[in-house]
Image (cartoon, rainbow, N blue to C red):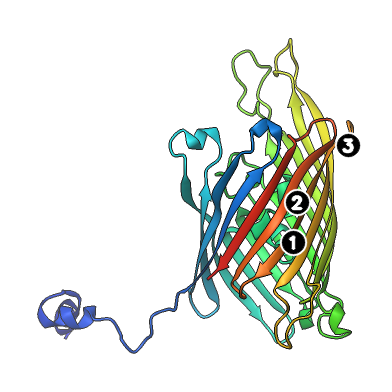
Amino acid sequence: MQRTYFTAALFILIPTGGVAQVTARPDSSKPAPAVDFSGILFANYQYRTESAVGSANKFDVERAYLTFRAPAGDRATVRITADLYQQATAGSDSYYRGWSLRAKYAYIQDDFLKGKAWRASARLGLLQTVFVEHDDSFWPRWLGTSPTERAGFFSSADAGFANTIMLPGGFGEIYTTVTNGPGYTSREVDRFKDVATRVTIRPWASAGPASMRGVALTAWGYKGAIASRFVNGGAGQAGTVGDALRRDRWGVHAASASPRLTVAAQYGSRIDEGEDGLNTLASPRVVVDSVGSLLSAYASVRPLPGAATQPHPLSLLLRIDRVTTNTDTDESYDFIVGGVIWDFSRRLSMSLDYQAAVPREGRPVQPARTWFAHFVARY
């Protein structure tokens, strides 16, 4: 009897003849997982007006995001977003003076709580950092990066773990991340991790006046650290330095969005530690603090009445950032955006806008004044 069972098992396992053909055939009764594809393309023509650059102008494809989403079980999904970007640094230009493709988002998401009132999910991989995506839900990113990202607070994506808790009735969400810190354009460079949390409250999301349902009040905090540049020591140095340098940020943000008017204002602060000296007896290592701040406001308004089911395609936009790069020296600059946007459809828009970076105290940035014709296509 045992020999009979063993012979039958071998017959099933050995891929010979017609048996192999039957077992290798896919089960057509189960549909293949659906893959959702979408994307967005940013392009512009720009003309600079500073005399130092001699009226430089160019056509540019700033970004093309290619996003793929697919289920990975009953409650899990996978997202991969490829980022087509133009290389701008000298090191990148040395091997290719054009566009390259890299991953911006690549994560698996598990919707582990799907209640009638409460919902929660976890993500692992290349994912959204604590605040930039929330700000981008009000600011049109195709005109330029949002204020905190442009001011160098942190990148819009990084590798790590994230957890989202959605409050009942659309009242808000709590988003928490643990990430490497350098951002999605760099591999991990040290052993330290950054922890951040954002709390967003929408007080009138499910009740109250219609004009107030798009109001979102946010507070966020970011506790980060980076390694010393003397972490490995070296010839002539006083030794290795294993202590972390602070890289902390926090901010508050208030915004309201409606078909006719979108407004937002925010304040952010950052604390960075740096190092002076060469970590030698003649030039000891000294930790120095650098505190900066950001005050920003922007608004987009549609001044003309639209149709019953669709807003008017014309909108006006204004943004002003006040960036203080060092509060001790009062070095600061203003970044200004002003323009007109026309929506050809829900998926295709263009703008004529003016952007300027203007130093106020010191020389924290080079003056820049540029006219743009921006285009965005969503597909």
Considering the numbered disc 1 on the image, is that residue within a helix, a strand or a loop?
A: helix
Residue 216 seen in render? yes
Depth order, front residue of 242/264? 264
Where residue 134 appears, x then y in whole percent? 73, 64
Disc 1 to disc 2: CB gap under 8 Å = yes
Where residue 332 appears, x then y in whole percent? 84, 38
Depth order, front residue of 94/118? 94
Give neighbour class at mark 2: few <14, some 14-19, many 20+ (Cα, 10 Å). Answer: many
Asked if residue 92 is positioned above or below residue 298 in the image, the reply reads: above
Where residue 208 appears, x then y in whole percent? 88, 85
On the image, numbered disc 3 is attached to which residue?
327
**Residue drawn at x 42%, y 78% as measured from the top left:** 33
> For the view shown, which residue lies furthest in the left direction?
17
Residue 156 seen in render? no
Asked if residue 273 is positioned above or below residue 319 in the image, the reply reads: above
Type of amino acid at the residue the image marks with label 3: Thr
Is 153 left or right of 350, judged from the image as shown? Answer: right
Asked if residue 175 is positioned above or below residue 305 in the image, the reply reads: above
Mark 1 vs 2, N-terminal side: 1
Mark 3 vs 1, N-terminal side: 1
Disc number at residue 135?
A: 1
> How far is disc 3 from disc 1 in space, using C-alphas?
24 Å
On the image, numbered disc 2 is attached to which residue?
148
Type of amino acid at the residue the image marks with label 1: Asp
